[in-house]
Amino acid sequence: MIRSGMFLIFFLSSTATFAQGSCPWVPTLGKTPDEVAKLVEEKSGKKPTKACGGGTDFKVCHECSAKLSPEQWRRVQWMLAEPAYRDWHFHWHQNSVTDARTKAKELGKSENELQGESFFYAHREFYRNVQANLAAMGLPCISPWSKAPATMDDPNFETIESVLKKQALPVCAKLDPGGQKLKQLQAFENERPSAEREVNEFARNRMAEVRALTSPTERMKADRKAQQEIADARAKARALMTNKPPTMTPQEEDALRRCLDRGAVRDFRRSHEDMVLHGTNEFLAKNSLGQLGHAIDGSWHGPLHNLYETRQAPDCDEENIAPHCDSMGDAISSHVNMNFYKLHGLVDEYAEKWMARRGFEIASKNCEGKEKCFQWTGSYVGESPDFVNGSGCTMVHGPNGVVAANRDRARPSKSSTQPSRGTQKTKQAK
């Protein structure tokens, strides 16, 4: 069949094996930045000089770009969609917690801390592998998002506005054709959490007092009084806000609010303060790298995955390995999506801030004889494909971009075995 706009052909195929010297994919796992840079130079014919995330020492790029064209991205996307690559990312999320638990007992360290460190380490490896292969093809590397967005429609996160439109209910377009009311409501909602922080604390304390009453009659009366006091306090706080909600009937505002308060957007808004907090000097000073990774994995990492999630095509089941199956909300497909690397480039910047604050210039699994080197303890990376670790070059796809769907290959189940990641919809691992 042909998918409109993608022009991809699906057919049954046997696995293709390339001689190592002719492998179209540059292996990066277990290699130093200098070794990867040399491979990139051999493939591209020019010496790389830039680092576009993944560590300041990872200078394997020729240039950095905020956004690659669909044609450029498809040059690497076909390999990211390969079953072994999908399995690698999926099973890392499935097994990383178990690995951390086992290693924690051996080392006498915190399970969460080791898992948080592995979160940084493994995703840095995913990130580096794609950057190196883009550069090897003579293409720009992907510039990561450089900082937490100042607001929900920060231009650094150029697709948030389009995401809001994609996720809006059909009624939104009728209520707000130009999108101005939604933007106004969004600004109001962005400011509201900080404006109502004291009110929320007051509400928690008042309701605790109500719940402490033993008499049902007294509790009912106290509840009505408390609810009115809370409503009055909230109204006063909102009257002092800079941003006001749009002028609409209560019914219209309720409908428009449903457009804004979709789960992914709501979760992202709630976690925005954590994005800012995790980059502060105070937080970086009092937490280890593993604690930082665990905090990020369990807070804003997942909502960002979900915010940039694309709707899966109807044919994207466990068997379909086509590149257009790239939902950001699923561990079996998120790494095929270009936004994954912008997001994890941002995540990696937090690790870089932590290291720089402590005077580290490089990170390695073995720092013997290396100065200013942070030695990874949590470094679980899972079972990587042979074309990533350099042990071979076996693949189902062909380098011409034609997709060979090997339906004899069993796909991991996305139901009970769906990996939990502060990233994806189940517990949410982003």
Image (spheres, rainbow, N blue to C red):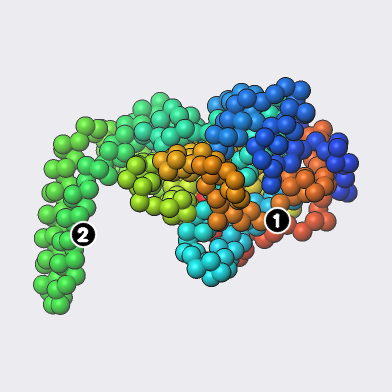
| Image location of residue 188, percent across then percent down | 28, 36
Residue 13: give x, y in percent of width and height: 87, 47
Of the pair 141 and 75, the residue shown nearer to us: 141
From the image, which quarter does the N terminus lie in?
Answer: top right
Looking at the image, residue 254 sits to the left or right of residue 420; the answer is left
In the displayed orientation, state which residue is furthest to the bottom: 214
* Image quadrant where residue 250 sits: top left
Measure how far apart labels 2 and 1 are at the Cα level: 47 Å
Q: Position of residue 136 (x, y in %)?
A: 72, 30
Specify the amino acid type for callout 2.
Answer: Arg
Above or below: residue 99 compared with residue 278: below
Look at discs 2 and 1 and give the one toward the viewer.
Answer: 1
Q: 248 left or right of 179? A: left
- The answer to whether any part of residue 159 appears in the image is yes
Question: What residue is disc 2 on?
Answer: 204
Instruction: Say which mark, if any, is on residue 346.
Output: none
Q: Is residue 306 visible?
A: no
Q: Nearer the viewer, residue 261 or 374?
A: 374
Percent of width and height locating residue 393 = 82, 45
Hey, which quadrant is residue 390 in on the image?
Answer: top right
Residue at horizontal 19%, vertical 70%? 211
Residue on which the image places disc 1: 383
Residue that appears at 59% across and 54% down: 379
The residue positioned 69% from the left and 32% from the top of the image is 37
Which residue type carries mark 1?
A: Glu
* Residue 340 figure quarter: top right
Label 2: element kind: helix
